[in-house]
Image (spheres, rainbow, N blue to C red):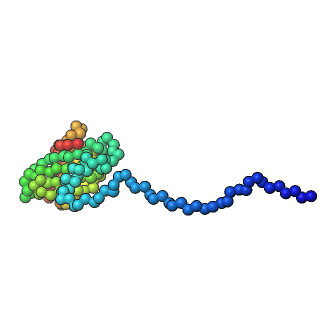
Amino acid sequence: MLLFITPDRLPAPVSEIETPTPAPEQSARPKSKRKAKSTDTSADLAKREVSSPTAKTEKTATNSLFDGRWAGTFIGVPAKGNVDYALTIIAAGTMVTERAIWFGSSSTHHATCDGKTMRWNDGTSEWTATLNKDGRTATVTNDYGLGSYHSSVLFRKTSP
């Protein structure tokens, strides 16, 4: 004797339903457009970098004392006389833009900084800047060329 037992219900058939892939969501923020070339000088750019949040890096308290704008006058520069200089220092003392007011030009250079003294070379001169105890003045030394000019000047910090 053979007994057949059948279930009350059969399983539902398997069917594949195609669903469209959802489109990627659009960003709420529009993409930034490239800006036209600026006629800013290197000094203007350095000034902006000093205050720019993207230019700020993790700094130690001693290195950040150099960052800012400094001013001083070199006395008796051969064939030039007294020359006013402005230094803009950023990146914990590892980048300096020097601007000679008399020459009307500026240039930016990489520097080394140990927290007390910065050193850089601008292609014609060896420079050092040694921070004084007050944190608002520094002794800046310029050795030009092959020893043809050497001067140490007190620079004052004009802005943070």
Q: Residue shown at 21%/40% (left/top)?
A: 136
Q: Residue shown at 31%/50% (left/top)?
A: 54
**Residue 26 showing in the rendered view:** yes
Q: Quadrant of residue 5?
A: bottom right
Q: In the orientation shown, which residue stands out farthest toward the front?
A: 8
Q: Residue shown at 48%/58% (left/top)?
A: 22
**Residue 113 showing in the rendered view:** no
Q: Is residue 58 above or below residue 11?
A: above
Q: Is residue 26 left or right of residue 115?
A: right
Residue 151 screen position, x and y as percent: 15, 51
**Nearest the camera: 114 or 65?**
65
**Nearest the camera: 8 or 45?**
8
Residue 79 screen position, x and y as percent: 7, 58
Question: What is the count of numbered marks?
Answer: 0
Q: Quadrant of residue 143?
A: bottom left
Q: Is residue 126 left or right of residue 77?
A: right
The quarter in which the N terminus is drawn is bottom right
Residue 30 screen position, x and y as percent: 33, 55
Residue 55 screen position, x and y as percent: 30, 50
Q: In the orientation shown, which residue stands out farthest toward the top?
A: 134
The quarter in which the C terminus is drawn is top left
Q: Residue shown at 87%/56% (left/top)?
A: 3
Q: Is residue 50 above or below residue 105?
A: above
